Image (tube, rainbow, N blue to C red):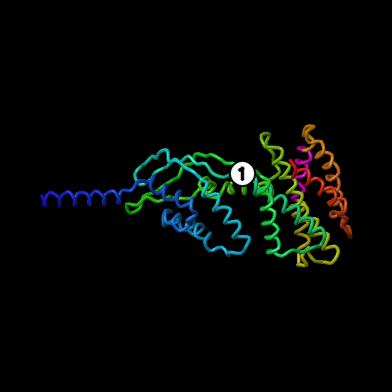
């Protein structure tokens, strides 16, 4: 009896060891997603293949962020949302030492909050810049955090659902996640990956617009273009240079390079003029204001091109503020 019991025990132990050595790729994905619900960054990093030092480093960097009030609030927001994320592993396909795990996810969509916060913060900082007030990075962060708190009270929390595929790889009998792609990070980061790309595209796009693009998004991109490419990087710098030989923050600038960059930015404007002119009556107010703002942009650019000694930005400021307010309200 004792001999039989010993055999059973040994068999169980051997089976358990075999089970540990051949853990499925789904187990690794489960470990990552469960850890992400708790924002357990260290455990998340452990599931990434050791050779992918870039993704591991970026994951661990979250823990090393300086914990000022701004960063703490931002991380607390993401941690709270992570706890609301749900998922279901629906299958996997294994091909040797590689596998693809499919997961259905539901997570907080923080995109609208991020976009609204950046839009409002940009408008406010723009007004301060026009007033000649120079803000420190800490002060800008405080403005951003304050606006985000207010927007969080206004914007209704919504959720996104997505089916994502996670690539896994097996090394030394252990399954790892091969890479943390954008779709996976979007789930963990409350949709901020998608929102961030859309915001970045609106600032740095080539001016091309698809028929399928949402007018509110296109107009937000045009507003960002006017604010960033034309004003911040162009007219504002040139105006200050003409006044005192320095940039808007009192820094040295290459004025010829600034003018060259402005010329490149102005090449996009004709497409935006055409787009706004083609909007329907639902955007009548925006079209009316743009029809005042656009000629001011052209006039200021002509002054720059002709070598004018000064640059009058008063009407541009008035019309652009009105345009930004209308776009923000969409």
What crowding class fits label 1: few (fewer than 14 Cα within 10 Å), some (14-19), or many (20 or more)? few
* Number of dots carrying numbers: 1
Q: Is residue 165 positioned above or below 144 on the image?
A: above
Could you say where residue 224 lies in the image, as x and y percent from the top left? Answer: 73, 49
Residue at 72% x, 51% y: name it.
Answer: 120
Above/below status of 214 relative to 191: above
Q: Residue at x 52, y 39 (%)?
A: 162
* Res. 292 image quadrant: top right
Expressed as whole percent of the image width and height from the top left, the position of residue 241 reads 82, 63
- Label 1 SS: loop
Q: Quadrant of the C terminus?
A: top right
Q: Which residues are magenta?
A: 264-275
User: Looking at the image, which is closer to me, 327 or 247?
Assistant: 327
User: For the stretch drawn in magenta, what is the main secondary structure?
Assistant: helix
The x and y percentages for residue 323 are 80, 45
Q: Which residue is mark 1?
A: 157
Looking at the rendering, which quadrant does residue 231 occupy? bottom right
């Amino acid at each position: 009896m004792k001999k039989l019991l010993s055999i059973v025990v040994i068999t169980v132990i051997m089976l358990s060891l075999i089970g540990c050595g051949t853990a499925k790729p789904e187990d690794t994905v489960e470990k990552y997603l469960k850890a992400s619900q708790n924002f357990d960054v260290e455990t998340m990093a452990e599931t990434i293949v050791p050779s992918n030092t870039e993704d591991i480093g970026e994951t661990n960097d979250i823990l090393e962020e300086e914990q000022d009030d701004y960063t703490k609030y931002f991380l607390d927001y993401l941690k709270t949302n992570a706890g609301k994320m749900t998922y279901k592993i629906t299958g996997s396909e294994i091909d040797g030492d590689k596998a693809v795990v499919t997961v259905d996810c539901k997570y907080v969509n923080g995109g609208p909050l991020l976009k609204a916060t950046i839009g409002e913060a940009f408008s406010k900082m723009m007004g301060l810049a026009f007033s000649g007030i120079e803000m420190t990075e800490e002060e800008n962060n405080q403005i951003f955090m304050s606006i985000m708190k207010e927007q969080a009270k206004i914007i209704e929390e919504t959720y996104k659902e997505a089916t994502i595929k996670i690539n896994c790889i097996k090394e030394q009998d252990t399954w790892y996640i091969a890479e943390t792609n954008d779709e996976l990070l979007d789930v963990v980061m409350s949709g901020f990956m998608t929102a961030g790309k859309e915001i970045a595209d609106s600032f740095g796009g080539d001016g091309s617009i698809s028929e399928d693009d949402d007018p509110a998004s296109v107009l937000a991109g045009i507003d960002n273009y006017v604010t960033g490419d034309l004003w911040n990087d162009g007219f504002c710098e040139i105006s200050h240079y003409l006044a005192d030989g320095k940039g808007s923050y009192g820094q040295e600038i290459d004025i010829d390079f600034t003018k060259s960059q402005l010329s490149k930015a102005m090449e996009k404007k004709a497409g935006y003029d055409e787009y706004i002119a083609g909007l329907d009556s639902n955007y009548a107010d925006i079209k009316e204001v743009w029809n005042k703002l656009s000629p001011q942009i052209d006039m200021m650019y002509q002054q720059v091109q002709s070598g004018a000694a000064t640059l009058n930005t008063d009407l541009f400021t008035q019309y652009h503020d009105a345009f930004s307010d209308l776009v923000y309200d969409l």
